[in-house]
């Protein structure tokens, strides 16, 4: 599900503050992922929960740098859409060196 938001709603989004959409309060949950920044501005994804049915939505924002580097940022969004999301656990497997290999390298003097 996706919900269209108005420009006024998008501009009212501030980190860790509630949002009103269709006369319903949405509670701020967390920032999803890490902030990204380049010479044009900063990019964030915020997660909000609609209190009435406990559904969560991701809202993507970017903060456009205005003036020189130290002047500040103005928030905006390209699509003004809140996308329904749910939190899932993801298991990741990696191949790691076995501890005996470290000791074997020590014995023959091939450590870094």
Image: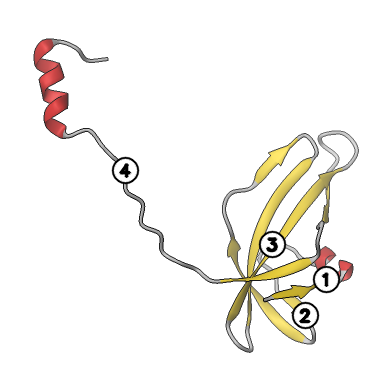
Which residue position is annotated with label 4? 94
**Nearer the camera: disc 3 or disc 4:** 4
Q: Which residue does the image show at 15% across and 18% down from the upper left?
A: 105
Q: Looking at the picture, how far across and down is residue 57, in whole percent?
A: 64, 71
Q: Secondary structure at mark 2?
A: strand
Residue designated by label 3: 15
Tell me the residue that label 1 is attached to: 9
At horizontal 86% and vertical 71% (from top left) the residue drawn is 6
Badge 3 crowding class, 10 Å Cα cut-off, few under 14, some 14 to 19, many 20 or more, is few
Chain-order first, disc 1 or disc 4: 1
Q: CA distance from mark 3 to mark 4?
A: 34 Å
The image position of residue 22, as x and y in percent, is: 80, 84
Query: Residue under circle 2?
Result: 21
> For the residues marked 3 and 2, what is the alpha-carbon distance in whole angstroms?
16 Å
| Mark 2 vs mark 4: in front | 4
Residue ID at (60%, 87%): 53
Q: CA distance from mark 2 to mark 4?
A: 42 Å
Mark 2 is surrounded, within 10 Å at the Cα level, by few (under 14), some (14 to 19) or many (20 or more) other residues, namely: some
Category of crowding for the residue at label 4, using alpha-carbon neighbours closer than 10 angstroms: few (below 14), some (14–19), many (at least 20): few
> Left or right of 108: which side holds 20?
right
Residue sitting nearer the eye, 107 or 96:
96
Residues at discs 2 and 1 in contact (Cβ within 8 Å): yes
Q: CA distance from mark 1 to mark 4?
A: 42 Å
**Badge 1, how many Cα within 10 Å: few under 14, some, many 20+?**
few
């Amino acid at each position: 599900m996706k919900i269209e938001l108005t420009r006024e709603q998008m501009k009212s989004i501030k980190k860790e503050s509630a949002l009103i959409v269709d006369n319903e309060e949405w509670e701020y949950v967390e920032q999803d992922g890490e902030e990204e920044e380049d010479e044009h501005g900063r990019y964030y994804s915020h997660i909000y929960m609609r209190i009435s049915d406990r559904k969560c939505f991701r809202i993507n924002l970017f903060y456009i740098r205005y003036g020189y580097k130290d002047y500040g940022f103005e928030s905006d969004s390209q699509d003004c859409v809140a996308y329904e999301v749910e939190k899932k656990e993801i298991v990741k497997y990696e191949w790691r060196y076995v501890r005996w290999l470290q000791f074997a390298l020590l014995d023959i003097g091939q450590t870094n």
